Amino acid sequence: MRAALELARQAAAAGEVPVGAVVVKDGEIVGRGFNAPISRHDPSAHAEMLALRDAAQRLGNYRLVGCELFVTLEPCLMCAGAIMHARIARVVYGASDPKTGACGSVLDAFAELRLNHHAEVAGGVLAEECGLVLSSFFALRRAQQKIGAIDGTTGHSTRQSDNDCQVAGHHESPVPEEPR
């Protein structure tokens, strides 16, 4: 998870919502990714998706059997679907996402018995630190917006909603409504 946190910080430095992910096989990182939908002009460029793509390329197979995914924020439904298709064995996430989380916060895609693959899921790993990276990013964004440092064309994420967003258990720490 520490490697995923470092990738989340790289995302923040690039002006992206700070989410990082790594794919691990036999104790070795085989895939890395951080959020990049803004810079790539790609709504599917979530950290998990990029880490899965990286791992599949490195391993030469789109099936990532025996691999684990570590991600700083609970995966959304899109990412959960890709995780299932890749046959990831275990998903470990940091902060819960009470707005779009698909590992139990909003819905639990991996518990749906009608689906053909069910990864083991563990949440809350380094949750406070993962949530702090997100909340710090958005606090800085709000401060910059107040002084006019960011406008609608220079990296402002239009998916942010500050009014009612929060990391589960961190009511004072807002995160985006749709964090990616």
Image (spheres, rainbow, N blue to C red):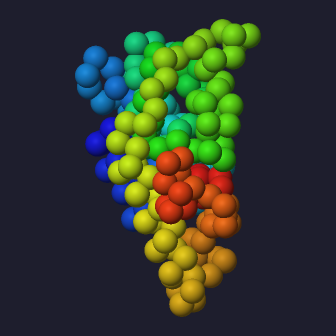
- List the single residue furthest toward the left: 27
Front-most of residues 131 and 60 = 131
Is 115 located above or below residue 4 in the figure? above
Q: Give me the residue at 26% from left, 22% from top.
A: 27
Q: Can residue 127 be seen in this view?
A: yes
Q: Quadrant of residue 127?
A: top left
Q: Give me the residue at 64% from left, 76% from top.
A: 153
Horizontal and vertical percent position of residue 174: 55, 61
Front-most of residues 137 and 54 = 137
Front-most of residues 23 and 141 = 141
Horizontal side of 130 relative to 163 (left or right) equals left
Horizontal side of 109 relative to 127 (left or right) equals right
Horizontal and vertical percent position of residue 143: 50, 81
Front-most of residues 34 and 77 = 77
Horizontal and vertical percent position of residue 91: 46, 26
Horizontal side of 179 relative to 33 (left or right) equals right
Q: Can residue 60 be seen in this view?
A: no
Q: Quadrant of residue 148?
A: bottom right
Q: Give me the residue at 40% from left, 57% from top.
A: 132
- List the single residue furthest toward the bottom: 147
Is 56 located above or below residue 11 in the figure? above
- List the single residue furthest toward the right: 114
Is 36 located above or below residue 108 in the figure? below
Quadrant showing the N terminus: top left
Is 118 located above or below residue 91 in the figure? above
Q: How many labels does the image show?
A: 0
Q: Give me the residue at 49% from left, 61% from top.
A: 173
